[in-house]
Image (cartoon, rainbow, N blue to C red):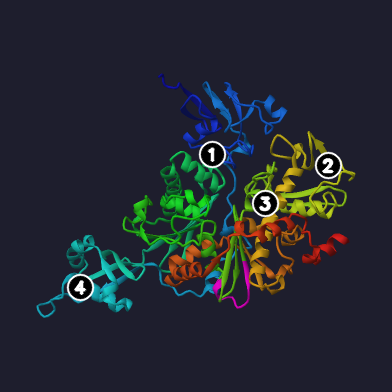
């Protein structure tokens, strides 16, 4: 049997060439070339985000309603559908690229729980998971013949106040010890790592190197990987780096990535991808700050359950299959080098604990960061991302759940939806005359609408009577912005002449339906947790909103559409990337690390999919703001004016 022919694909504007066998798709070629092509659905041909232009050559591309007639004339195809049958030149249009899109993370956002404020609120004792201590010992004599290793252990016991049976030293260290002790004239620096009940002697160096001890704290998000360089001696955040998670080329939803990994036996590839992101970030940090890799002794990672599985190369398949079980929720510390992270070869990696398949270390870490475990009265903690993860609780109890709600507010299933990056419309206002004003991230021409803008849009359409409470367009409004295109109505938010793309930016009836379902999923989950504990909305002392989406959320609009309970806005706080804050805290404090584990063990997980009341609540929440207006008195008053 003859082998398939191989063709050369030239990607622009990257000016990158790759060779790939006949019959593969353009998206496959992009993956092979490590070029990002926006593909929210992971290549299933349903999101329409992977549009590319055939500059030269033709592909076997089936017709699709996701490509307009005008786009087809300009040789647009879906990268995931277009099969390669000859050499091609592919232009990736601006809206499909990743380049130039601003990454937003906690230290740049005014609403975030700042590091200083978080440390003050947390009140965790400074005691790093990996520490360096300078020890000066008496030299041995004929009257003091204590063995070298025993002498070192005695010094550690006195300095740290620990028992001998908790100290562990590898044979590798013991072999080198005589030379190091004498080279340092019995003054050495011991690097000690907390590993459960054991205090491991990770390294021993001659002289005093205790001032050069750094750690890495990481939030492995589905979209972004944010890495912080921590001075473990002072608790100072030295520098931060944020990059897009390169796994996005396999699908923007982590469920799509799991499917890709299983179907293509690509779990190792997924791990290499995320480890490469981490190593690139760490290298950028140490080069900027003049830090040596050998002085980075720890890595603390937070992230959702799937991302932690990919990092550790754990089988994620059962996360998406009933009864939705992760391989592990709690992982013991191990050498970071075992998975290829490039720090001190004996440095330790600590993965923070998850609760279940859809409540991950991002939530447990965040709950510790805001000290939910110290709250006297019931509070809600909501991390709005690809999944809406929610905790209700206080110092005595905690219940949690996950609502599959985030993708629509991150652009999935919305014609002109996009993540919060440069060119995204983040604020929208519609006047009584149906005129639209807006603000974009980076103050550049709009390319699409991100989550906060989409939420504003739905609230404003409702206020102006452009849609009714069921989310349907009111066809009798007198505005040219409302128009029928093919079999569906849409509302023009921004005309083509003002945009940074080759079309008007609109919101369609289908978009609205998807967004209403997403907000309904979050509200129904909140309602189930509150009801399960015999509480009412009025019993909530505070709602904490975490995640990138939360930073730009207009709280009043979130209440107006029925995503958040009807509470005074003063009782709703933005706290930013608490997943990262919790990881930073754990790196500088054993107490914080233990608190994250304690919180994870205290959380009772509610499986909403098996709860019949959830579906009832979800259906009731599929109105604006809700079928029962009594749950939203302030909105009822607002809409009646």
Which of the 4 image quadrants contains residue 54? top right
Q: Position of residue 512 (x, y in %)?
A: 74, 47
How far apart are labels 2 and 1 at the CA level?
Answer: 34 Å
How far apart are labels 1 and 3 at the CA level?
Answer: 21 Å
How far apart are labels 4 and 3 at the CA level?
Answer: 60 Å
Secondary element at image label 1: loop
Q: Earlier in the sequence, mark 1 or mark 3?
A: 1
Q: Earlier in the sequence, mark 2 or mark 1?
A: 1
How far apart are labels 2 and 3 at the CA level?
Answer: 22 Å
Q: Is residue 534 visible?
A: yes
Task: Residue 527: say if magenta.
Answer: no
Secondary element at image label 4: helix
- Residue that label 2 marks: 482
Quadrant in which the C terminus is drawn: bottom right
Residue 451 is marked as 3
Q: Earlier in the sequence, mark 4 or mark 3?
A: 4
- Residue that label 4 marks: 150
Q: Answer few, some or many: residues within 10 Å of disc 4's Cα (few below 14, many 20 plus, some between 14 and 19).
A: few
How far apart are labels 4 and 1 at the CA level?
Answer: 55 Å
Residue at screen point 49% across, 61% down? 354
- Residue that label 1 marks: 36
Q: Is residue 284 visible?
A: no
């Amino acid at each position: 049997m003859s082998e398939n022919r191989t063709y050369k694909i030239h990607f622009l504007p990257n000016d990158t060439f790759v060779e790939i066998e006949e019959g593969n798709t353009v998206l496959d070629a992009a993956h092979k070339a490590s070029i990002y092509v926006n593909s929210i659905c992971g290549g299933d041909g349903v999101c329409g985000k992977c549009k590319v232009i055939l500059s030269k050559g033709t592909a076997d591309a089936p017709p699709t309603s996701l490509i307009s007639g005008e786009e087809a004339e300009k040789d647009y195809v879906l990268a995931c559908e277009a099969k390669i049958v000859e050499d091609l030149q592919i232009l990736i249009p601006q809206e499909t690229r990743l380049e130039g899109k601003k990454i937003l993370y906690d230290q740049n956002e005014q609403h975030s729980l700042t590091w200083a404020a978080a440390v003050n609120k947390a009140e965790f004792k400074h005691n790093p998971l990996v520490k360096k201590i300078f020890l000066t010992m008496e030299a041995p004599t004929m009257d003091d013949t204590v063995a070298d290793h025993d002498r070192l252990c005695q010094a550690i016991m006195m300095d740290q106040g620990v028992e001998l049976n908790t100290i562990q030293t590898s044979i590798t260290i013991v072999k080198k010890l005589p030379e190091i002790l004498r080279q340092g004239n019995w003054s050495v620096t011991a690097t000690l790592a907390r590993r459960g009940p054991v205090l491991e002697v990770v390294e021993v160096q001659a002289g005093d190197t205790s001032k050069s001890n750094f750690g890495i704290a990481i939030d492995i998000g589905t979209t972004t990987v944010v890495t912080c360089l921590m001075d473990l001696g002072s608790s100072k955040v030295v520098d931060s780096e944020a990059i897009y998670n390169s796994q996005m080329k396999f699908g923007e939803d982590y469920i799509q990535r799991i499917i890709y990994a299983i179907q293509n036996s690509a779990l190792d590839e997924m791990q290499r991808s995320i480890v490469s992101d981490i190593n690139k970030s760490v290298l950028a940090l140490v080069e900027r700050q003049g830090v040596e890799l050998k002085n980075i002794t720890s890595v603390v990672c937070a992230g959702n359950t799937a991302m932690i599985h990919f990092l550790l190369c754990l089988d994620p398949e059962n996360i998406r299959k009933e009864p939705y079980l992760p391989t592990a929720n709690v992982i013991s510390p191990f050498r970071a080098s075992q998975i290829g992270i490039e720090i001190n070869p004996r440095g330790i990696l600590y993965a923070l604990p998850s609760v279940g398949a859809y409540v991950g270390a991002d939530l447990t870490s965040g709950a510790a960061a805001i000290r939910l475990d110290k709250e006297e009265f019931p509070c809600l903690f909501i991390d709005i991302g690809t999944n809406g993860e929610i905790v209700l609780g206080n110092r005595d109890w905690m219940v949690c759940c996950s609502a599959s709600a985030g993708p629509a507010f991150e652009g999935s299933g919305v014609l002109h939806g996009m993540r919060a990056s440069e060119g995204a419309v983040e604020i929208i206002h519609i006047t009584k005359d149906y005129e639209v004003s807006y603000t974009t991230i980076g103050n550049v021409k709009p390319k699409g609408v991100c989550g906060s803008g989409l939420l504003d849009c739905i609230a404003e359409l409702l206020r102006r009577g452009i849609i009714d409470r069921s989310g349907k367009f009111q066809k009798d409004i007198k505005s040219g912005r409302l128009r029928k295109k093919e079999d569906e109505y849409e509302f023009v938010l921004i005309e083509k002449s003002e945009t940074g793309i080759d079309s008007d930016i609109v919101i369609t009836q289908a978009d609205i339906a998807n967004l209403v379902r997403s907000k309904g999923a979050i509200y129904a989950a909140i309602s189930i947790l509150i009801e399960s504990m015999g509480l009412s909305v009025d019993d909530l002392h505070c709602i904490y909103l975490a995640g990138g989406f939360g930073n730009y959320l207009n709280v009043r609009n979130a209440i107006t559409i029925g995503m958040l309970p009807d509470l005074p806005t003063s009782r709703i706080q933005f706290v930013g990337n608490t997943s990262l804050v919790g990881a930073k805290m754990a790196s500088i404090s054993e107490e914080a690390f233990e608190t994250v584990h304690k919180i994870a063990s205290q959380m009772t997980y509610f499986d909403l999919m098996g709860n019949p009341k959830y579906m009832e609540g979800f259906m009731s929440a599929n109105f604006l703001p809700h079928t029962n207006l009594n749950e939203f008195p302030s909105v009822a008053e607002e809409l009646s004016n």
